[in-house]
Amino acid sequence: TNRFKLKLGCWTTIDCNGKTVIIAFSLVPAGEPKDAFVWAFKMFRKHLGAPTVKFTDGDPGMAGAIQIVFGGDGTTHLLCLYHIFTSLFKHMRKLFGSDKAAWRAFVDMFWRIAKRSDLRSRCEFAAEFAELTALAQATTCCDEKTRRLAFEWLAELGERREQWAARFTWKHLTLDVHSTQRAEAIHSALQHIISSSDKINKLWEKVQGFESDRCFRRFMDEHRHELVHLVPTTELSVLVRDKLVPILTGEALSRVRKQAQLSSLYSVVLDDPLAAEGMPECSKLYRAINPNNHHHNYNYNAHTIQPSPVLKLLTSIMLMLTLLLLQMPS
């Protein structure tokens, strides 16, 4: 929030690789009035069109604005399960007092109801939610007003079942998104690079720069995964893929591949050429990446690694040059 009391809100989606992408952002008054959301949604619709599915935290002003702006476009408004549970804790936890076992049973039942995705169970939702309500009504904590407000909230949640219960929401294509966590993660990251004193042009540059950096990282991830497909499917290549690929960029992985190829300069000397335990790791890595290269020379009499003649010659030349340089007057 800056000195004009405006709040930054980012519009995020998922790209073809499952990565979060910022497609727009808006600045609205801190009180988040409905009119401000209507304006922001109209601008979004004007430039980017109406979204097919939109997740929100359940803010009433935002919900009303979605209905006004996107109501005629068939946009489906779904609720973030994370925020629903946060509200559930806020409104219902106090009813259970110190009875932690009853609270855990209530929470477990809520999540079973929320996650049940069988479409055929839609007709059973009312009975399941009534059972959940009865579990809360069995408590005796809190005053009458607190209990009344809590059950009013719970009843409203049940009425909005088609916006959060999986048996109703899974008919919509959400690309495995069930909350606003991606947007929340973006907002959390942006807090480290933006300041309340930033001017609008500076804010724009920082958000653009942040997204550009993330695009570069996505490109490197794609490049890294493309390189994985170049590695043949062997026991060792699986090890390389599982251990190295998750922690290396595409450039680093390509350098590892080049380094592994240097093992071809060595001759592997084994008692048994098929014994994996006798083969040095560098040669096993090279053979995994280059299975068609059979230029390794085997001697079946000892478990040693000997430099190839080419490497011996190169080493001798480098040693001679080094000695000559040391003997030259400074």
Image: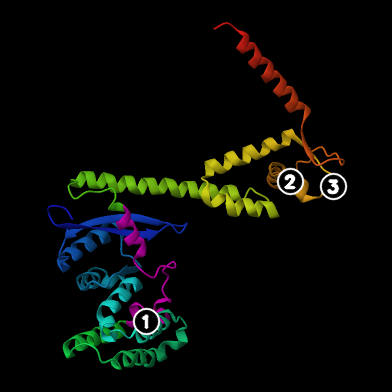
The numbered mark, 1 or 2, whose residue comes first in the sequence reads 1
How dense is the environment of label 3, judged by Cα within 10 Å: few (below 14), some, or many (20 and up)? some
- Which residue position is annotated with label 1? 107
Q: Mark number for residue 291?
A: 2
Q: What element carries label 2?
A: loop
Q: In the rendered view of the protein, which quadrant contains the C terminus?
A: top right
Q: Which of 256 and 94 is in front in this view?
A: 94
| Mark 3 and mark 2 residues within 8 Å of each other at the beta carbon | no
Q: Nearer the viewer, mark 1 or mark 2?
A: 1
Q: Is residue 75 above or below residue 183?
A: below
Q: Marks 1/3: CA distance? A: 61 Å
| Mark 3 → mark 2, Cα distance in angstroms | 18 Å
Which picture quadrant has residue 182?
Answer: bottom left
- Please determine whether, in this image, residue 148 is positioned above or below residue 11: below
Q: Residue at x 75, y 25 (%)?
A: 312
- Quarter occupied by the N terminus: bottom left
Is 94 left, or right, of 168 in this rendering?
Answer: left
Q: Which of marks 3 and 2 is nearer the N terminus?
A: 3
Span of residues in magenta: 161-189
Q: Gap in Å between the C-alphas at discs 1 and 2?
A: 54 Å
- Tell me, for residue 203, which label it has, or none: none
